[in-house]
Amino acid sequence: MNTNPYQTPGSDVVDYLPPDPDGAGFDGQPRSLPIGRAVDWLKEGWGLFMQAPGLWILIYLTFFGIMLAAAFFPLVGSLVQNLLFPVLVGGLAMGCDAMRRGQPLEFAHLFAGFSRNSSQLFMLGVLYTAAMLVMLLIAFVPTVGLSGGMALFGGGDPDALAAALGLPLMLGLLIYLALAVPMLMAIWFAPHLVILNDVPPVEALKLSFFGCLKNILPFLLYGILTFLLAIVATLPLLLGWLVLMPWLMTSTFSAYRDIYYN
């Protein structure tokens, strides 16, 4: 922490995390909650969003812009996105935690993950990318590769090749989507656990997965409610997404607190 007596006063967003004001403690293990808690997550998330709606929208637009710009990197766009995503989400988790403590949300919170546990957050991105590649291999190599090879050796006719690949592609996609669900469960709370609780990346992925698994019913209701909200957000020329996306970030933080703290 800077001790320069001549420096203009300001607030530090990443130097340390003070004791929890409400006395709640990090359990280290997720707990199972009733299905109705999904509604509370959205309510509490809305409360956090409404404390600084304009700043939340600005943060979301910047977040979206960074991820969109990363996609334009030749060949490595997806890798850059996967590496940045946990770092930025971790910073947003710190912003939510600061607001819960009665401190103001700051634009700098978006980048707080670059200053706290950054190597662990980047490692989350590496592990996530590696898992995605393994999923692609599992889903498409046995289906598309075998069928495509048989079609090519059968004469190489383009129409025959397209016909031969149609069903395997659909099967591979279904397998990939089935594998993507547990991977999404593993990454959902991992940035929060790494940046706010100093949990190592692999352990954070495990805790996130089991946190979601133990609360499959609340998350099912949460998914239904957010799907309905997404429909509403889409109607006014997609402008509702400017509110919905930061709201989902704050409600995810609420779920994290509810599941991992006593």
Image (cartoon, rainbow, N blue to C red):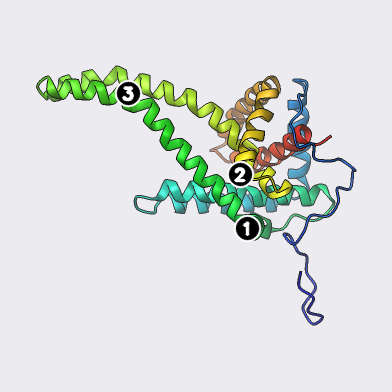
Q: Is residue 142 left or right of residue 246?
A: left
Distance, label 2 to label 3, CA atoms, is 30 Å
Distance, label 1 to label 3, CA atoms, is 41 Å
If you read the primary sequence from the N terminus, does the residue marked by circle 2 or circle 3 appear first? 3
Question: Toward which corner of the image does residue 250 lie, by quadrant?
Answer: top right
Tell me the residue at 65%/41% (across/down). Answer: 243
Any mark on residue 142, and which? 3
Height in image: 136 above or below 111?
Answer: above
* Residue bearing mark 1: 111
Height in image: 209 above or below 191?
Answer: above
| Type of amino acid under label 1 | Phe
Q: Quadrant of the N terminus?
A: bottom right
* 169 or 19, nearer to the observer: 19
Tell me the residue at 77%/58% (across/down). Answer: 16
Whole-percent x, y for residue 192 in the image = 68, 44
Height in image: 13 above or below 8?
Answer: above
Tell me the residue at 54%/32% (across/down). Answer: 183
| Type of amino acid under label 3 | Pro
* Residue 114 seen in this snapshot: yes
Whole-percent x, y for residue 6 in the image = 79, 82
Question: Local crowd at mark 2 within 10 Å, few (<14), some, or many (≥20)?
Answer: many
* Residue bearing mark 2: 201
Mark 2 or 1, which is nearer the eye?
Answer: 2
